[in-house]
Image (cartoon, rainbow, N blue to C red):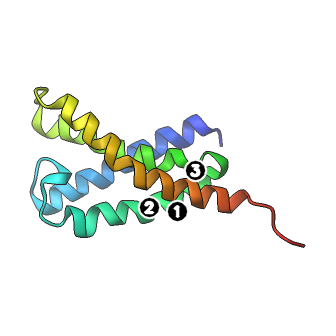
């Protein structure tokens, strides 16, 4: 399976995840929920780690894609563009830890193993 297909599939799955968070918490934006920092954002780290293994050497992409998948959901739910630059900056900062985690698991998946 090529990387572009994996990335697109992950983006769609990530959007479903963040929309599920919005639906479950009855908020328009995932990061507006009270449990975002305690539950939903940490769960995205676990998902990033798992998908990082599948992406192998390009594992860092998993964390970025999963985190940035919040932005289309926010746009679809709010239809506002006034704070779009702030959302992109926020998502960029939030993506850094998820990218580090998924990069590590991707590296771990391809590292040489002792025989």
Estimate the spatial distance between the alpha carbons at disc 1 and disc 3, rounded to whole Å. Answer: 9 Å
Tell whether 103 sits left or right of 88. right
Q: Secondary structure at mark 1?
A: helix
Residue most toward the top? 81
Residue 55 drawn at (x, y percent)? 60, 50
Tell whether 71 sits left or right of 63. left
Q: On residue 59, which mark appears?
A: 3
Neighbours of disc 2 within 10 Å: few (<14), some (14-19), many (20+): some
Neighbours of disc 1 within 10 Å: few (<14), some (14-19), many (20+): some
Estimate the spatial distance between the alpha carbons at disc 2 and disc 3, rounded to whole Å. Answer: 12 Å
Q: Nearer the viewer, residue 40 or 19?
A: 40
Q: On residue 50, which mark appears?
A: 1
Residue most toward the bottom? 115
Residue 68 drawn at (x, y percent)? 35, 42
Disc 2 and disc 1 in contact, CB within 8 angstroms? yes
Determine the residue positioned at 34% across, 65% down: 42
Q: On residue 87, which mark appears?
A: none
Mark in front: 1 vs 3: 3
Determine the residue positioned at 24% across, 51% down: 19
For residue 68, say whether it is visible. Answer: yes
Residue 12 drawn at (x, y percent)? 39, 43
Query: Which corner quadrant of the image does residue 89 belong to?
Result: top left
Q: Secondary structure at mark 3?
A: loop
Determine the residue positioned at 21% across, 29% down: 85
Determine the residue positioned at 22% across, 58% down: 21
Mark in front: 2 vs 3: 3
Q: Where is the N terminus found, in terms of image quarters? A: top right
Query: Which corner quadrant of the image does residue 111 belong to?
Result: bottom right
């Amino acid at each position: 399976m090529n990387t572009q297909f994996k990335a697109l599939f992950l983006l769609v799955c990530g959007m479903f995840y963040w929309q599920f968070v919005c639906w479950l918490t009855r908020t328009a934006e995932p990061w507006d929920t009270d449990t975002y920092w305690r539950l939903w954002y940490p769960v995205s780290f676990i998902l990033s780690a798992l998908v990082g293994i599948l992406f192998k050497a390009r594992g860092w992409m998993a964390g970025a894609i999963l985190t940035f998948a919040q932005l289309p959901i926010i746009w679809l739910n709010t239809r506002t563009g006034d704070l779009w630059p702030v959302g992109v900056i926020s998502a960029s900062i939030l993506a850094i830890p998820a990218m580090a985690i998924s990069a590590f698991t991707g590296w771990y998946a391809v590292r040489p193993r002792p025989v």
